[in-house]
Image (cartoon, rainbow, N blue to C red):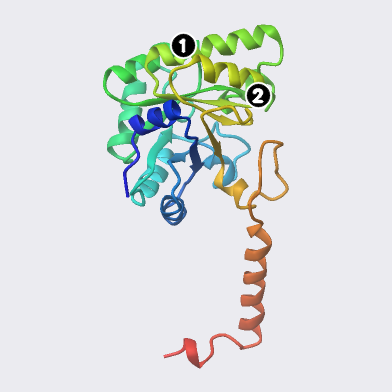
């Protein structure tokens, strides 16, 4: 089993092989994804939405991210492990950004970090890259910016936004990022950015022409309730399966059908 590195992701872009990335927040899920052959495991700050019950990602702390990254990294054998830098862990100063990114790698076991922003974060990406911390960029719909954006809205729909996102993508690459996530932007813009950049692009709600795709694992498995953005594809519906198993357990316990002699000592 060959270990995936950031150099492999570049080779995949250059050869036209698509990159696959899914989120993971715990050891058993990460183990299954890694054994299934996923290229990149992302410990997203989406842990706040899907695991902690927050309305958005803003309350997630660096301690939260170190904890979940450590759990995922223990399962890693093949995949590249990338950890999100949460809100206010990199915006205050270069020194704090380096310190927090270092924690995700040294204490959490990540091999790279991901942060949101384009031209406005060029100096931060450059500063991390200069101390050999690999950075994945993230532009377009950036969930940590939803107060400014007015919610989860598609970005790049008009000419001004289109040109701004092109400039953001170039700034991320220029600063030294090894790849960039493109979230919720028109597919034609994603196609143009992907053709323009030398580094890999990974799309989420950005069409098929990106160099790779990422989704939240809970969405893929049908574990997000009624929440289903347009760009999500549910490959299985596990929620009713889990509920049925729990209901069967409850029934058998109450009717004294479990445990049987087979489960007793």
Q: Of the residues tagged 1 and 2, which is closer to the observer?
A: 2
Mark 1 lies on a secondary structure that is helix
Looking at the image, is 208 positioned above or below residue 264? above
Residue 129 vs residue 88, the one in the foreground: 129
Looking at the image, tell me whether mark 1 or mark 2 is earlier in sequence order.
Answer: 1
- Check the image and report above or below for 177 versus 250: above
**How packed is label 1: few (under 14 Cα within 10 Å), some, or many (20 or more)?**
many
Residue 93 shows in this picture: no
Residue at mark 2 = 187
Q: 99 and 194: which one is in front?
A: 194
Q: Which residue is depicted at the point 37% across and 39% down?
A: 80
Quarter of the picture holding the C terminus: bottom left
Circle 1 is placed at which residue position?
Answer: 171
Q: Is residue 72 above or below residue 252?
A: above
Q: Residue extending furthest front?
A: 15
The tag on residue 244 is: none
Q: Nearer the viewer, residue 78 or 241?
A: 78
Q: CA distance from mark 1 to mark 2?
A: 20 Å
Tell me if I can see residue 249 in this picture: yes
Instruction: Find numbered disc 2 in the image and state the secondary structure of the residue it sits on.
Output: helix
Pinpoint residue 119: horizontal percent, then vertical percent: 49, 10
The answer to whether residue 129 is left or right of residue 57 is left
């Amino acid at each position: 089993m060959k270990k995936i590195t950031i150099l492999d992701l570049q080779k995949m872009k250059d050869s036209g092989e698509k990159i696959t990335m899914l989120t993971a927040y715990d050891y058993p899920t990460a183990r299954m994804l890694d054994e299934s052959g996923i290229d990149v495991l992302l410990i997203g700050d989406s842990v706040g939405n899907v695991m902690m019950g927050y309305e958005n990602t803003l309350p997630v702390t660096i301690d939260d991210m170190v904890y979940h990254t450590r759990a995922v990294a223990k399962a890693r054998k093949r995949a590249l492990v990338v950890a999100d830098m949460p809100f206010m862990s990199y915006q205050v100063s270069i020194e704090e950004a380096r310190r927090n990114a270092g924690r995700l790698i040294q204490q959490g076991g990540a091999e790279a970090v991901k942060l949101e922003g384009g031209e406005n974060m060029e100096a931060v990406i450059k500063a991390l890259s200069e101390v050999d911390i690999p950075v994945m960029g993230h532009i377009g719909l950036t969930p940590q910016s939803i107060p400014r954006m007015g919610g989860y809205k598609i970005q790049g729909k008009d000419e001004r936004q289109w040109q701004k996102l092109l400039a953001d993508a170039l700034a991320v690459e220029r600063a030294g990022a090894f790849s960039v996530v493109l979230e919720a932007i028109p597919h034609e813009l994603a196609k143009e950015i992907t053709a323009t950049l030398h580094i890999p692009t990974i799309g989420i709600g950005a069409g098929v022409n990106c160099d790779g795709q990422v989704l939240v694992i809970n969405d893929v498995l049908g574990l997000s309730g009624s929440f289903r953005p347009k760009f999500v594809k549910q490959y299985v519906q596990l929620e009713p399966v889990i509920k049925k198993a729990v209901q069967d357990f409850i029934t058998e316990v109450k009717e004294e059908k479990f445990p049987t002699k087979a489960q007793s000592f």
